[in-house]
Image: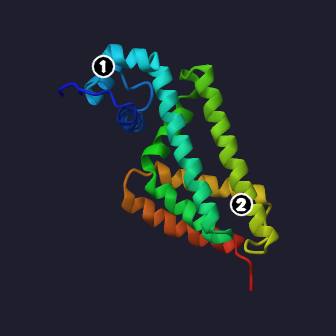
Amino acid sequence: MPREKDFNQSTVIKKCTFLFANNGYSATGIQEIVESTGINRSSLYSTFKGKDELFLTCLDVASKEEISALNEMNKKFTGLKFVDSYLVSAIKSQTQSHLFKFASAEFKLLNKKTQSFVNAHYRWRYHFLLSIVQEGQKTEKISKKLEAKDIVVMLELITQGIQNLSSLADAEKLYKKSVLRFSSLIKKKK
């Protein structure tokens, strides 16, 4: 692949996010990154100081995109509509989901800074979803039959199940089945 004339950091991060999401952290080598992005090895090291820093940058960008998307969903939807849109987004954001999946699976291979970032991201998402579910229970758009924290754990398990599937068709089937079962547990009876 010919070298890029201009070093575009955002393009490099997108390409590297795709590589890390498909191969994992440990299976993605510096040479593969250089070949895929078309940048010089020296540019890579002068900008990111190595694979650890590049991976952390990819996680940071993916995290910011997820936070932004969840905040937008929260402005548009409440209660079960938010839950539904959250699960739909789990299907659509496969690359970001796989990136965090590999970060979790290869957690011990990562440096302390990256481990801390991954933990903080998951804590933020858990608390964000918990506040949505609690608000839904207060406004009676979500049933109080279950503890809010249990609903969030189930929601995360469903999301992880959807994200771990490789094909979109299977993900959509699982999504529909899971949402029906999940919704029947947390719907407010009229």
Is residue 96 placed above or below 107 in the rendered structure? Answer: below
* Residue denoted by label 1: 31
Disc 2 versus disc 1: distance between alpha carbons? 43 Å
Q: The residue tagged with tag 1: helix, strand or loop?
A: helix
The residue at 78%/68% (across/down) is 137
The residue at 46%/52% (across/down) is 93
- Look at the image and tell me whether residue 145 can be seen: no
Residue 83: horizontal and vertical position, in percent? 62, 64
Q: Which mark is residue 132?
A: 2
Q: Amino acid at mark 1?
A: Gln
Q: As rendered, which of 9 and 179 lies closer to the eye? A: 9
Could you tell which of marks 2 and 1 lies nearer the N-terminus? Answer: 1
The outermost residue toward the left is 2
Query: Residue 42 is drawn in which quadrant?
Result: top left
Residue 155: horizontal and vertical position, in percent? 63, 58
Q: As rendered, which of 151 and 37 lies closer to the eye? A: 37
Q: How is the image coloured?
A: rainbow
Residue 17: horizontal and vertical position, in percent? 41, 36
Q: As rendered, which of 3 and 1 lies closer to the eye? A: 3
